[in-house]
Image (spheres, grey):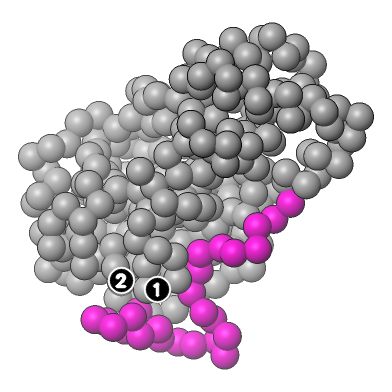
Amino acid sequence: MSSQQVLSPELRAWVVAQLAAGHSVPSLRVAMREAGWQDDAADAALSSVELQAAGLAPSVVQAASPRIGMPGPDLSGSPLYIDVGDTRVEVLQTMRHPRVIVFGNLVSDEECEALIAAARVRLARSLTVETHTGGEALNVDRTSDGMFFERGENEVVARLEQRIADLLQWPVEYGEGLQILRYAPGAQYRPHYDYFDPAEAGTPSILKRGGQRVGTLVMYLQEPAQGGATTFPDVGLEVAPKRGTGVFFSYERPDPATRTLHGGAPVVAGEKWVATKWLREREFV
């Protein structure tokens, strides 16, 4: 494990938060070992933070400060359309805080059908990332079926991923694999955050694969007859799940102050299919 991984801002923030919460260094060492960190790497990370113990509050502030580079389209001049090479994406709605942008004409009907057909035979009960352990687990708050495509797995996936990269000015390699979800009547995803909680023991293990999540793009492949909006409870926003459109939101730090609490409202009638792309701060491996 390289020193860059060991001393990453995310790991430092997690260690500082745990120390500030009253956890002992030995208990953190055990938690890091259980999360997959080697003893020498854990010791190096803990030692570097212990040396700053006298300045704990400044360290926390620094770790929580917003990033400079973030994914997102160029909206200077308030464009109605953004040319991304193979299509003109519509800018339908924007919000500053939280940073939310609704796009139209993002996914064609043919692409929607192709993604649904390829995903249908591979669906399973959706899992969520388990920040306590760094693995995945069933979650009663999420009642959809889903699957993941590998990055660039087929022609349609690769084309859409490149379109997203061009639109959001974020490298393809910084994106997780495309997730496809199906919500049957009654299915929902209760409000949650997409970033990984720095205070959880499993977070350092998760962050090894590409750092924090910094943005989410939800694309609607099939609209239900009723219900299924993407909701942002902190700001009273609901985005209708219209086919071919997408909603993007970013979060510059892993903190509720970003106001990115969001959820998928229950589907009342019909089925909702979505494709979700999560963006990391560096290459996802």
Whether residue 86 is in magenta: the answer is: yes
Q: x, y percentage for residue 63? A: 72, 44
* Amino acid tagged 2: Arg
Against 55, residue 26 (above or below) is above
Q: Nearer the viewer, residue 123 or 178?
A: 178
Q: Nearer the viewer, residue 189 or 150?
A: 150
In this view of the protein, can residue 256 be seen by the observer? no
The quadrant holding residue 54 is top right
Q: Nearer the viewer, residue 249 or 169?
A: 169
Q: Main secondary structure of the magenta part?
A: loop
* Label 1: element kind: helix
Extent of the magenta region: 65-89
* Amino acid tagged 1: Leu
Residue drawn at (24%, 42%) of the image: 148
In this view of the protein, can residue 27 be seen by the observer? yes
Q: x, y percentage for residue 66? A: 69, 55
Q: Is residue 83 left or right of residue 63?
A: left
Q: Is residue 199 left or right of residue 52?
A: left
Residue drawn at (30%, 71%) of the image: 163
Against 184, residue 177 (above or below) is below
Q: Count every numbered label the image shows and give the total.
A: 2
Q: Is residue 26 left or right of residue 36?
A: right
Local packing at callout 1 (Cα closer than 10 Å; few below 14, some 14-19, many 20+) is: many
Identify the residue position indicated by label 2 in the image.
Answer: 163
Residue drawn at (37%, 25%) of the image: 136
* Label 2: element kind: helix
Residue drawn at (28%, 83%) of the image: 85
Do labels 1 and 2 touch, CB within 8 Å?
Answer: yes
